[in-house]
Amino acid sequence: MNILNLFVIIPVVTMAAILFTKDLRGARLVSAVGMGLQLIAAVVLIFSFFALRKAGDSAEFLFYSDVTWFESLNIHYAIGVDSIAVWMIGLASVVVFAGIFASWQMEYLSREFFISLILLATGVFGFFISLDLFTMFLFYEVAVIPMYLLIGIWGSGPKEYSAMKLTLMLMGGSALLIVGLLGLYFGSAQAGEVTFNLLELSRINFPVTMQRFFFPFLFVGFGILGALFPLHTWSPDGHASAPTAVSMLHAGVLMKLGGYGCFRVAMFLLPEAANEMAWIFLILTTISVVYGAFGAIWQKDLKYINAYSSVSHCGLVLFALLMMNQTAMDGAIIQMISHGLMTALFFALIGMIYSRTHTRNINEMGGLMKVMPFLAVAYMIAGFASLGLPGLSGFVAEMTVFIGSFQHQDLFHRVITIIATLSIVITAVYILRVVGKILLGELQNPEHQKLGDALWFEKLSLVLLILPIVAMGTLPLFLSNTILDALKPIVERLTAMI
Amino acid sequence: MSFQYTILILLIPLACFLINGLVGMKFKPLLSGILGTAGLGIIWLLSLFTAYTYFFQVGQVNGEFQKIVVINAEWLRFTDKLHIDMGILLDPISVMMLVVITTVSFMVHLYSIGYMHGERGFQRFYAFLALFTFSMLGLVVATNIFQMYVFWELVGVSSFLLIGFYYDRPSAVAASKKAFIVTRFADLGFLIGILVLSYFTGTFDFIALTGSDQSIFASGAAASFMGLSALTWAALLIFMGGAGKSAMFPLHIWLPDAMEGPTPVSALIHAATMVVAGVFLVARMFPVFFFQAPAALELVAYVGGFTSLFAAIIACTQFDIKRVLAFSTLSQIGYMMLALGVSGYGGHEGLGYMAALFHLFTHAMFKALLFLGAGSVIHAVHSNVMQEMGGLRKYLPVTHLTFLIACLTIAGVPFLSGFFSKDEILVAAWQSNKFLFAVEFLVAGITAFYMFRLYFNIFWGKEKTYAHPPHESPLTMTIPLVLLALGSIFAGYLPFSELISSDYKPFETTLHLSVAIPSVLIGLAGIGLAMLFYRRESTLPDRIAASLGSFYKVVLNKFYIDELYLFVTRKIIFNYISRPIAWFDRHIVDGTMNGIGWVTETSSQKIKGLQSGRISQYGFVFAIAAVGLALVFIYFIN
């Protein structure tokens, strides 16, 4: 059997098993076991994938299989992965597994919570393995819908408002997407039978007029999920209201679906339009990068700070993708993985700190280093990763993006690259502001004196996220080279057009 | 001779960092101190051995020092040509820096066992010291500019962590934040400089960049932007990074505040090693500056000259002894920058280059000694402020003697190391730029004055009443003082010009009496003036300060540069950029989204009446519509 099927089967079985549990203890145990197996499967996948590559299997997608499930419309369950998808699956499994432990004490409707959370994960995994655009879209929706429930029921603050806003904006994106996908689907008729298969679509050269029409639908549709300015405002409210594990999954993985779709679908299939319109989106993403960072400086709520920071970092992902050269796109993908881990770490920590102090306002905390050193050190590591300290993943990602982008022959691209590099200073400002306020200094609230440090499941969750951040930051060569290889066909298709 | 073992010089401090950082809390404090010190001791010996074999046995081939790449492994690949490698490059300047760093770091490790005794977070302190040492060593042995940048950032963060060591003190937290952000801003320039340089030359590699093949620069020299060539911009931006780390005006503001860190840290990072990284960077890239960007090199000279004067003037007015030393450091690094800036290339032309690195070497010894001596004083009287000191020479004999040696050295008293290195700098300045020479000549006098103002205020003057009688520091602290004092005395006798030169070929230098004699005289004049003012308690300094009036106040407040920065950061960035952006995002961007929601909802409210479910209403609408449509068909369609 194809190993990729496991990534859908394991979550479904886990959800079914949760139904038979009685309370929180059972639900979390089953979830942890299920997602633990998922993580093991991901590790096995990574090893077997690169073993195959090493053995000389140079097909674009490995573990390919194809089952027709809606014959009259020629819709397939086609799956397969390249190294980018493999790393994305690896990222998702780490974040989901860590997310289970971050919600270890979710007392309220715990079974329902874990089922929704794993349903969301199912959508994410399904999305990354799919090669049939319809199936991919289906999984995408499976990932987005549980979000509404998770925020609306288990959230905090103005949760109904945030949940509604987030869902409506993402649904708006989906509406654009479906138009774009149908455009591709019916456009493929020129080469024979209509199809949603990504591989078959990638062999078609669509007419430029048609590309121009549909590219914005696809790019903006995915871009909304990737926090493309000015359609990013679901993110701050959504994150602020979401429960910890949901923020982790959402910022850590779900937002990556946006970036992933942007290059895998929009840019890869419609390369000429992508080249023509890149400048518009480059300007928007440059704004995202700098504006998000400046926006973060002023915020007082930890989650808002992180949400704006995500706007800036995810903006850099789209920015680098649009540079359309191998190095910059490599950087974009490393940035996706790096940001996924680091922002999940941030949200996990914010959740843990909030559960102790009952506030997320940075002015109401101070000197937490003394009372919760483990959490504080982990927060500093996350912060350093975010501001791009060498030795942690953020540096590798950002430098690859900047070097790649600056290799452009065109002055416009180099100038906006320099503008984007400003973000590394602004990021340092808001990260150190937060660290200085909440962790360092004197203990501000005497009540906080009696708070405890991280518990075992929290430590597990954090360490699980920190390890890959450090690994990527210290030994990036393998990761980067495998991504470069996978990007080759995409970049060739993108640049062949100019 | 193979230098493979030099990898240990990097790995041992890294291991010390990991051990002390991860499991140090489980150790007894003393154990982690001994572990760190022992590790440093080993790499100190290894470095000395490396220096000996490199300089005196195998480094020189056919009258020219070789660049030996011991190891170079690919770390991250960008394109076929551009990749970050991690490796070790041995050449005269990197080997010299190995000696400087490991010597000072070893002394500081040893000293801190006594100085930091009983402090909370002792293990953490040793972990950070090891991290810093590792990063600084990685920086100097870098084989390519990007490796240097990687370690450059790591050095920055170690500095941040150590300045903020007493993290429950708000002033320390603020200082560490300021240091990090100011240098980070400068590093942005460095990064952009690297981007520009690598775009045009297609390489990060130092050997290629500083080699004899100048053809890689052709495209960069041809491209111009705002009247300067692209390479000049690259050099200027790279220098910006160096100026940030080396605290050159106007990026110097973080250094005086950085004195919030523990004193051994100030000695190691903010006096002897990290702050000279900028000098090292310019020295490393010297051929690029000299051949491709002479305009940038000239700027280096003027920035150095200005900073040395500016900082020396401020140093005369400060009362916190560590701040006096901090401004003195600024001033001395200014000297080094100036020497590089006025230097030529090759043989005696390159005297400035040699002088800068010579001064870097001697300065590391005597400035580390001054800081450690100051630490010993602070340890004894529990204060940083010189008004609370006086007459300490009786209580702290070893500290007093070593501090006096260091003061004499920095003042340029003959036959101590500072005399030789400063003389070379003044000669180099004299040969190329008389104006800068005059500035440096003046600064030499001011330096002697403020150093002896410090000395007399601490050790002479009126004895203060102390809470408990001051006592000499323990041996772990005085031994490093004595060793560094020996270094300060004798470092000047090293045949520097035969070891380090701009073109790697040894050359001869002699003492230039025509420069040396006046500079010694002005130094002695400075000392004499200080003695007159401060040896006994006197009201003369206060009267002079009063007569200078507002000028004195401006200097005392460090020319209000900090206030200017605060204005820019607090007011402009925070209030006029960030705040409006946050508002814009909430009210305009998000407001539009909410507006769309509102329009949808309101219009649905308005038209929902049509779906009332009442048959009578439907019938009415049906009838009206039927009549209306009938009329339309009859009158318009026909």
Image: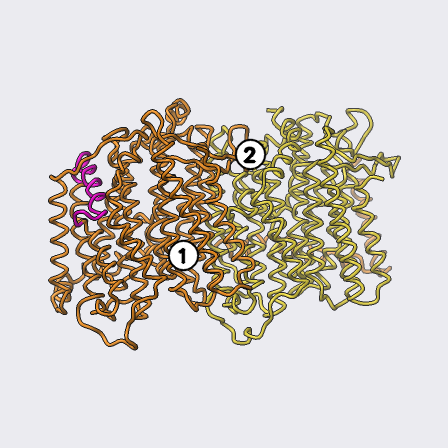
Chain colours: A yellow, B orange
Q: Quadrant of residue B429?
A: top left
Is residue B426 on the magenta stretch?
yes
Where is mark 1, residue-wise? B109
On the question of residue B237 being in view, the answer is no
- Give the quadrant of residue B277: top left
The majority secondary structure of the magenta stretch comes to helix
Q: Which of the two residues, A102 or A195, is positioned nearer the viewer here? A: A102
Q: Is residue A324 magenta?
A: no
Which residue position holds label 2? B77
On screen, A470 above or below B26? Answer: above
Q: Which mark is residue A176?
A: none
Circles 2 and 1, Cβ within 8 Å, touching? The answer is no
**Percent of width and height locating residue B189:** 40, 42
The part of the chain drawn in magenta is B413-436
Q: Quadrant of residue B343?
A: top left
Label 1: how many residues lie within 10 Å, few (<14), some (14-19) or many (20+)? many
Residue B584 image point, x, y percent:
52, 54
Q: Quadrant of the C terminus of chain A?
A: top right
User: Which amino acid, mark 1?
Assistant: His
Q: Along the horizontal axis of the image, is B18 left or right of B380?
A: right
Q: Nearer the viewer, mark 2 or mark 1?
A: 1
Identify the element where label 1 is drawn: helix
Q: Is the residue B18 above or below the residue B225 in the image?
A: below
Chain of the residue under the numbered disc 2 shown in the image? B
Chain identifier of the residue bearing label 1 in the image: B
Residue A200 lies left or right of residue A226; in this view the side is right
Marks 2 and 1 belong to one chain: yes
